[in-house]
């Protein structure tokens, strides 16, 4: 599949996640566990039968570390919701592209380019408009804000790690170990919190199945595949499109409405994403020549 088409497919799939979470009506950490674990249960038999799961020890450690970081991102973000509003938490958690750019520049010594930073600024402006500037003005510093910022950092680190390891390891082999580690970690957190882990309605089980197969398995296979070919900085900013797609789906599936500011903010976010995928002028001149 074309990497950009693969990325767009993945973003569309993970955009269903908030819909399934609302319909499931279960504790966030428990929902996250079944999302990842269900995907691993369906992936594992194929990997064990068809895929060579032997990878270098260093890559295995990084795949497991990536799973722990992915699970930490989900856990920390959900805990932040207990201290601040969902709108503010979402805005802060979506600062991941900024972290990816800074990590790439200062640690990996890669220049993200002017178009990336221009697109990031435009997309961030769209996020502020979408969630409402009044939420920023009345921002009160507390533990919830720290946790939401930490979640965005975890998300950024996961993208950087994934972008690096998938240059050497197959997508399915990586996801086998990655999701296994994430499942175990989320299960431990769920048990520690005393969450219900077995007694659910049929509706909740169907939501877990939908999240596992559509959002986690299909969504992250296609996103991780795109990371083999695209820069992590571009993928991180493109993932902001999940917020826009989730809002549109909520209109049709949950009968929610979009206000004028949410529509304007969504359009600006998409414009920012588009800017990051433009080719610099020097590359255009080379292609023409």
Image (cartoon, rainbow, N blue to C red):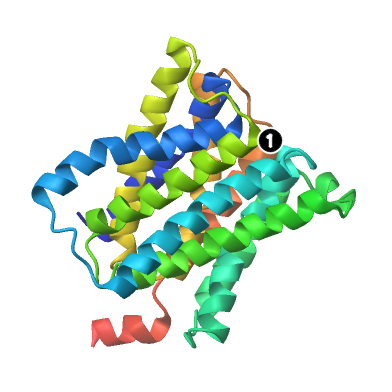
Comparing 191 with 246, the one in front is 191
Residue 207: where, in percent of width, then height? 43, 23
Q: Quadrant of residue 97?
A: bottom right
Q: How many marks?
A: 1
Q: Farthest left residue?
A: 50
Location of the N terminus by quadrant is: bottom left
Identify which residue is drawn at 36% across, 73% down. 164
Residue 252: where, in percent of width, then height? 49, 21
Residue 227: where, in percent of width, then height? 34, 63
Comparing 16 with 253, the one in front is 16
Left or right side of 117 for 138: right
Left or right side of 144 for 122: left
On screen, 59 above or below 91? Answer: below
Q: Which residue lies under the disc numbered 1?
A: 260
Comparing 78 with 62, the one in front is 62
Name the secondary structure under disc 1: helix
- The answer to whether residue 76 is visible is yes
Identify which residue is drawn at 64% across, 41% down. 78
Comparing 199 with 237, the one in front is 199
Location of the C terminus by quadrant is: bottom left
Identify which residue is drawn at 76% across, 57% down. 146
On screen, 247 above or below 225? Answer: above
Dot 1: few (<14), some (14–19), or many (≥20) neighbours within 10 Å?
few
- The answer to whether residue 130 is visible is no
Identify which residue is drawn at 32% across, 54% down. 177
Left or right side of 77 for 135: right
Left or right side of 178 for 240: right
Q: Quadrant of residue 154?
A: bottom right
On screen, 55 above or below 79? Answer: below
Residue 73: where, in percent of width, then height? 57, 52
């Amino acid at each position: 599949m074309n990497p950009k088409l693969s990325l767009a497919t993945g973003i569309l799939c993970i955009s269903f996640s908030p819909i399934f979470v609302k319909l499931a009506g279960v504790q966030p950490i428990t929902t996250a566990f079944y999302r990842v674990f269900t995907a691993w249960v369906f992936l594992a038999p194929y990997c064990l039968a068809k895929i060579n799961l032997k990878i270098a020890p260093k890559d295995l450690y990084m795949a497991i570390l990536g799973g722990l970081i992915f699970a930490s991102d989900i856990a920390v973000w959900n805990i932040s919701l207990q201290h601040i509003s969902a709108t503010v938490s979402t805005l802060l958690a979506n600062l991941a592209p900024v972290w990816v750019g800074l990590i790439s520049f200062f640690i990996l010594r890669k220049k993200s380019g002017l178009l990336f930073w221009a697109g990031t600024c435009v997309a961030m402006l769209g996020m502020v408009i979408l969630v409402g500037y009044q939420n920023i003005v009345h921002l009160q510093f507390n533990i919830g804000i720290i946790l939401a910022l930490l979640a965005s950092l975890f998300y950024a680190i996961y993208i950087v790690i994934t972008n690096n390891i998938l240059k050497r390891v197959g997508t399915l082999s990586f996801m086998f170990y990655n999701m296994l580690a994430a499942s175990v970690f989320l299960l431990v957190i769920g048990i520690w919190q005393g969450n219900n882990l077995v007694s659910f309605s049929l509706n909740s089980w169907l939501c877990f199945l939908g999240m596992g197969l559509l959002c986690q398995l299909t969504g992250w296979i296609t996103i991780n595949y795109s990371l083999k070919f695209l820069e992590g900085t571009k993928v991180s900013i493109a993932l902001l499109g999940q917020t826009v797609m989730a809002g549109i789906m909520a209109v049709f599936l949950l009968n929610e409405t979009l206000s004028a500011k949410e529509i304007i903010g969504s359009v600006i976010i998409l414009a920012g994403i588009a800017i990051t995928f433009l080719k610099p002028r020097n590359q255009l001149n080379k292609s023409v020549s």
